[in-house]
Image (spheres, rainbow, N blue to C red):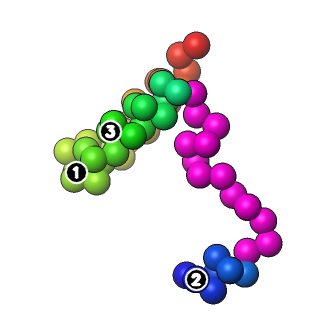
Amino acid sequence: MRRTISGSQQNVLWFEALFSTKATTVSQSNAAGLVTGSLSPEKFMRTVQDALAEK
């Protein structure tokens, strides 16, 4: 893994870097449920996508 990272020729933003404030908050506050399995990956992404769609 270190070799891959050190050999990288470009930077990549974390996937939340371009999220709105609300979507970032939704993502971060639901991450624990995703990790523990109390929230499915599909539900997590639907929740985040809904927050991203709000203006």
Q: Which residue is mark 3?
A: 30
The spot of residue 16 in percent (x, y) is 55, 42
The spot of residue 27 in percent (x, y) is 42, 38
Q: Is residue 39 left or right of residue 47?
A: left
Q: Which residue is mark 1?
A: 37
Q: Residue furthest top?
A: 55
Q: Is residue 13 left or right of residue 49?
A: right
Tell me the quarter of the image containing the C terminus. top right
> At numbered mark 1, what does the secondary structure look like: helix, strand or loop?
loop
Above or below for 47 versus 14: above
Q: Which residue is mark 2?
A: 2
Mark 1 or 3: in front is 3
Q: Residue furthest bottom?
A: 3
Q: Which residues are magenta?
A: 8-20
N-terminal label among 1 and 3: 3
The amino acid at mark 1 is Gly
Residue 23 showing in the rendered view: yes
Label 1 crowd bin: few (<14), some (14–19), many (20+), radius 10 Å: few
| Residue 14 belongs to magenta span | yes
| Residue 22 belongs to magenta span | no
